[in-house]
Amino acid sequence: MKSLYEELNESYIDVGDVKVPALVSVGTNYEIGFWGQRHKAYLKENHRVIYYNLLTQDSLNSYLHNIDIRAKEQYDLLVKQLAKSQGVTEQLKVKNQMLWVQKMNNISNQAREVIYNEIIYNY
């Protein structure tokens, strides 16, 4: 009969004189975008326990991926809604490009602020 160590020996790798568990990620590995990276930094700095719990449960990547998708969709929707409500159209872009750029930068900053407050810096 094999000991528990012998049975589990295949799931360890040698690092010098020490055997370390060969941890294999069973979750999917999504690419994390801008918003997900911002939320990750926020969790790591302000909510370390939550960050490390997600990391050790192998759910951090999928969690950040979901945050990234949700934030991106809400940002795009907010930009469209704010542009429509402020009358920023393609006709304005053709007529006065600098005014259009100024208004779109303002709209983008407003949308980013909403996303930061509602999704990124909120747990």
Image (cartoon, rainbow, N blue to C red):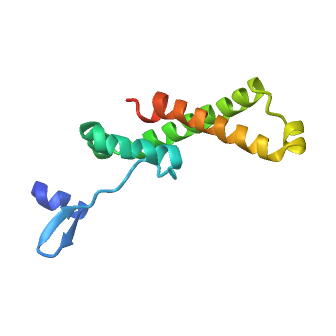
At a point 65% along the width and 37% down the height, the residue shown is 106
Left or right: 74 as drawn, with respect to 93:
left
Between 120 and 63, the residue placed more toward the observer is 120
Between 70 and 109, the residue placed more toward the observer is 109
Left or right: 24 as drawn, with respect to 64:
left
Q: Residue furthest top?
A: 85
At a point 56% along the width and 37% down the height, the residue shown is 112
At a point 27% along the width and 61% down the height, the residue shown is 22
Q: Residue 117, position in %: x, y?
A: 46, 30
Q: Residue 17, position in %: x, y?
A: 11, 74
Left or right: 61 as drawn, with respect to 57:
right
At a point 30% along the width and 44% down the height, the residue shown is 45
Q: Residue 85, position in %: x, y?
A: 75, 23
Label count reads 0
- Residue 87's place in the image compared with 43, above or below, is above
Res 3 quadrant in image: bottom left
Q: Quadrant of the C terminus?
A: top left
Q: Quadrant of the N terminus?
A: bottom left
Q: Is residue 82 visible?
A: yes
Q: Is residue 53 visible?
A: no
Left or right: 42 as drawn, with respect to 76:
left
Between 61 and 105, the residue placed more toward the observer is 105
Q: Residue 38, position in %: x, y?
A: 44, 45
- Residue 35's place in the image compared with 6, above or below, is above
